Image (cartoon, rainbow, N blue to C red):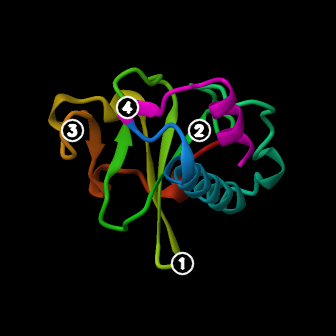
Amino acid sequence: MRRQSVNEAQRLRGRNGGASFGSKALEIHLLGAAGELAVASHLGMKDLVYKETEAKRGSCDLPGIDVKTRSKHQYDLIVQKNEPPEKKYVLVTIQDKTTLIHGWIYGKQAMQEKFWADPAGGRPAYFVPKEHLHPIDTLVV
């Protein structure tokens, strides 16, 4: 909730055309925070989560890691065109109170033309299918 209130106070726009204000934007932040906590718990890094005092676009959720949380288990990992290629991106899905950590990939591996898509129309990004992710237990931090 803190991130969303800071974003609204600074009049920041939602990423890649996503919601900026109101309940939908807050829902996106809450989903993301839950995914970050799931990954931090799995990796034994709970003491490192939620350290930022203001929302900073491009910051890491955990050291060197950006957690991407989606609301349906069938969804792919999304990496935006302008995100750092050296970061590790982790896909988490949360649906019907079930949380799954699917795996991870380096940005440079995700940013391949074959993953470029625009399924929602007007919001293109790299969409990496789960079968291209490394198992979460191989993530070295």
Q: Earlier in the sequence, mark 1 or mark 2?
A: 2
Element type where label 1 sits in the image: loop
The part of the chain drawn in magenta is 1-17
Whether pointer 3 and pointer 4 mark residues with C-beta atoms closer than 8 Å, the reply is no
Q: Earlier in the sequence, mark 4 or mark 2?
A: 4
Q: Amino acid at mark 3?
A: Phe
Residue hosting label 1:
97
Q: Earlier in the sequence, mark 3 or mark 4?
A: 4
Nearer to us: label 1 or label 3 = 1
Nearer to us: label 3 or label 4 = 4
Q: In the rendering, at what x and y percent does residue 65 appear?
A: 59, 38
Distance (Cα) linking label 4 and label 2: 20 Å
Q: Does 18 sit left or right of 112 as displayed?
A: right
Q: In the rendering, at what x and y percent does residue 76 appear?
A: 31, 53
Residue at 61% x, 55% y: name it.
30
Residue furthest to the right in view is 47
The magenta stretch spans residue 9: yes
Q: Earlier in the sequence, mark 1 or mark 3?
A: 1
Distance (Cα) linking label 1 and label 3: 28 Å
Distance (Cα) linking label 1 and label 2: 24 Å
Nearer to us: label 4 or label 1 = 4
Q: Amino acid at mark 2?
A: Ile
Residue hosting label 4:
16
Distance (Cα) linking label 2 and label 3: 20 Å
Q: Amino acid at mark 1?
A: Lys
Residue hosting label 2:
65
Prevalent SS, magenta region: helix
Q: In the rendering, at what x and y percent does residue 56 appear?
A: 65, 26
Residue at 23% x, 30% y: name it.
112
Does 58 appear above or below 63? above
